[in-house]
Image (spheres, rainbow, N blue to C red):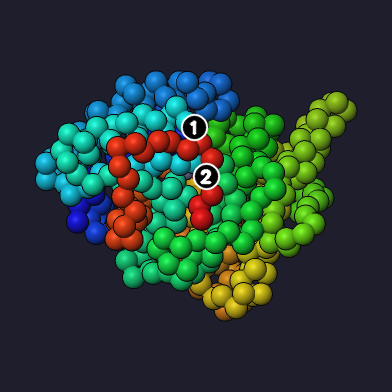
Amino acid sequence: MKILAIESSCDETAAAVVEDGRKILSSVVNSQIEEHKIYGGVVPEIASRRHTENICAVVSQALDDAGETLDSIDAVAVTYAPGLIGALLVGINFAKSVAFAKNKPLIPVHHLRGHIASNYLSFPDLKPPFICLVVSGGHSHIVKVSDYTKFEVIGRTRDDAAGEVFDKVARTIGFSYPGGVFIDKASKNGNPQAFKLPHPKVDGNPYDFSFSGLKTSVINLVHNATQKGEELNKDDIAATFQYKVCDILCSHTLSAMKDLGETRLVVAGGVSANSGLREMLIQRCKNNGVEVFFPKISLCGDNAAMIGSQAYYEYLSGNIADTSLNGIASLSIE
Ligand code: KG4
Ligand code: ZN
């Protein structure tokens, strides 16, 4: 089954053709980052307008690259939640129009389910059940994936998402948006023990995260030094901060897995590209008898191939939308 997938939940206009959930026939990603960089973050109205301008060309390119047409594909899939509402609606309306005009099934896909599916494209034999650590710009979840369309959130951030704090700390030390990747690079030259940062705990669920206190500590560290006329080593700040975030993500995830008796961990979302997180998880998983999977680097960030992969399993489970499909800015993965 060949699915044309469309993703427009944030600042990437993306389209892909994916066969049977596992084979990428084409994948086109048009990133708007250069424009949003000027503002230090995504400007929702600009994102929607650029999606509107680019979507026809991106979809045409994806079809051409795959050697397919709107007539030859079997279904159309689209990210319908969560995300920037104006941005989501562009992709949804486009997908709906194609489904309506060509009389094809319309498959709605949750963005985070798509991120998890990026691992099905990276590991052809990988199947649920497993535990997934989803770390993106907007979400940080520990999810129990018992089947392709069966999810239970067992831990979540109470405040900022991991990617969000990477970007905010990066901005504080002078890196451009989105700063996660610059922190990652700078960390390689820094001392991860250069400063003392808190390991925030939350009451109630021991697997939940809280990153905003950590973010504030780094911001205060930098501002206090600036007020004294001192300049802290950026590489050391990046390395200390990154080590702490990774330590929190790893320890909460592995303690949840130990308590639940789970032995397979899948990582997903933009932050799964982080080299420090990969290194630390590989080491700690090995020590704890856990098998760990990371998506290919090219599939960590937002793309439509992951939406096309998840769409296949949504279709098999009967999840098909009618033409009243609407966008939802905030929606649980469950
Ligand atoms: O999953 P994603 O592409 O978009 C959302 O669904 O939010 O994640 C984007 C986030 C950004 O915060 C970005 O800084 C972060 O992923 N990111 C990284 C790295 N590459 C991307 N964070 C840390 N290290 C990286 N190498
Ligand atoms: Zn994403």
Q: Is residue 51 above or below residue 259?
A: above
Residue 134 sits above or below residue 102 on the image: below
Q: Is mark 1 within 8 Å of ligand 1?
A: no
Q: Secondary structure at mark 2?
A: loop
Q: Look at the numbered disc 1 and give the secondary structure of its residue.
A: loop
Task: Residue 19 in the image: state x and y as whole percent.
Answer: 22, 55
Query: 332 or 186: which is nearer to us?
Result: 332
297 is higher (above) or lower (below) than 232: below
* Residue 102 can be seen in this image: yes
One can see residue 186 in this view: no
Question: Residue 41: percent from the left, percent from the top?
Answer: 56, 28
The residue that appears at 23% across and 47% down in the rendered structure is 105
Q: Residues within 10 Å of mark 2 (few under 14, many from 20)?
A: some
For marks 2 and 1, the one nearer the N-term is 1
The residue under the point 58% across, 25% down is 40
| Front residue (pair 251, 276) | 251
Residue sitting at x 36%, y 46%: 108
User: Residue lying furthest right in this view?
Assistant: 228
Q: Which kind of residue does numbered mark 2 sit on?
A: Leu
3D distance between C-alphas at marks 2 and 1? 12 Å
Q: Which x, y percent locates residue 74? A: 18, 49
* Number of other residues with Cα within 10 Å of mark 1, as a class: few under 14, some 14 to 19, many 20 or more: many
Q: Which mark is residue 114?
A: none
What residue is pinned by disc 1?
84
Which image quadrant for residue 5? top left
Q: Amino acid at mark 1?
A: Leu
Q: Quadrant of the N terminus?
A: bottom left
Q: Is residue 11 left or right of residue 66?
A: right
Left or right: residue 273 compared with residue 193? left
Q: Which residue is mark 2?
A: 331
Within the image, what quadrant is residue 318 found in?
bottom left
